[in-house]
Amino acid sequence: MTQPNANQPNQQHANRDAFGTGEPGEDAFPPVDQLNYETARDQLVEIVKILELGQMSLDESLRYWERAEELAGHCERQLARASKKVEDALSRRDGAGQEGGAGAQSTGANAQQ
């Protein structure tokens, strides 16, 4: 009977909340553009926690800081896209309401107060 290799992770007990490949290198983190907003935000929060511990070398800290900057930018872009979608939907709704007559306009004015 073979013993499990201590250097190979047990796939049955892998941490589903962890991110990255676990291997050092440029590709240790998944590309930011492949992440949805929630995953990017969660990774950003974890990186901030890691950096706040201050237990890494300067090079490691810089690598994590750079990743945090990428994640923050990605989250900002995702939020900007979502905000634009909401604004566009509201504009379409308001535009359709204005075509409906004065009653729709007063409803829109009341909604903004």
Image (cartoon, rainbow, N blue to C red):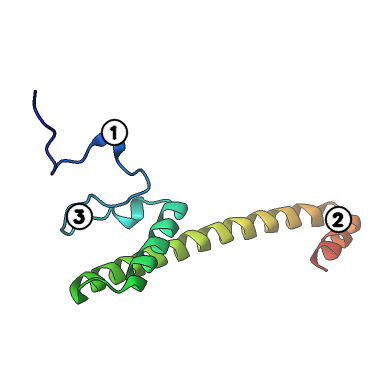
| Left or right of 19 in this view: 76 | right
Using the numbered discs, state the Cα–Cα distance from disc 3 to disc 1 in whole angstroms. Answer: 23 Å
Using the numbered discs, state the Cα–Cα distance from disc 3 to disc 2 in whole angstroms. Answer: 54 Å
Rendering quarter of residue 13:
top left
Which sits earlier in the primary sequence, circle 3 or circle 2? 3
Query: Badge 2 is on which residue?
Result: 104
Quadrant of image for the C terminus: bottom right
Which sits earlier in the primary sequence, circle 1 or circle 2? 1
Q: In this view, does 42 lie above or below 76?
A: above
Numbered disc 1: secondary structure = helix
Rendering quarter of residue 112:
bottom right
Query: How many neighbours does mark 1 have within 10 angstroms: few (below 14), some (14-19), or many (20 or more)?
Result: few
Residue 1 or residue 21, whichever sits in front: 1
Amino acid type shown at disc 1: Gln
Query: Badge 3 is on which residue?
Result: 27
Query: Badge 1 is on which residue?
Result: 12
Residue 65 or residue 69, whichever sits in front: 65
Amino acid type shown at disc 2: Ala
Measured from the top left, where is residue 58 in percent x and y? 21, 76
Amino acid type shown at disc 3: Asp
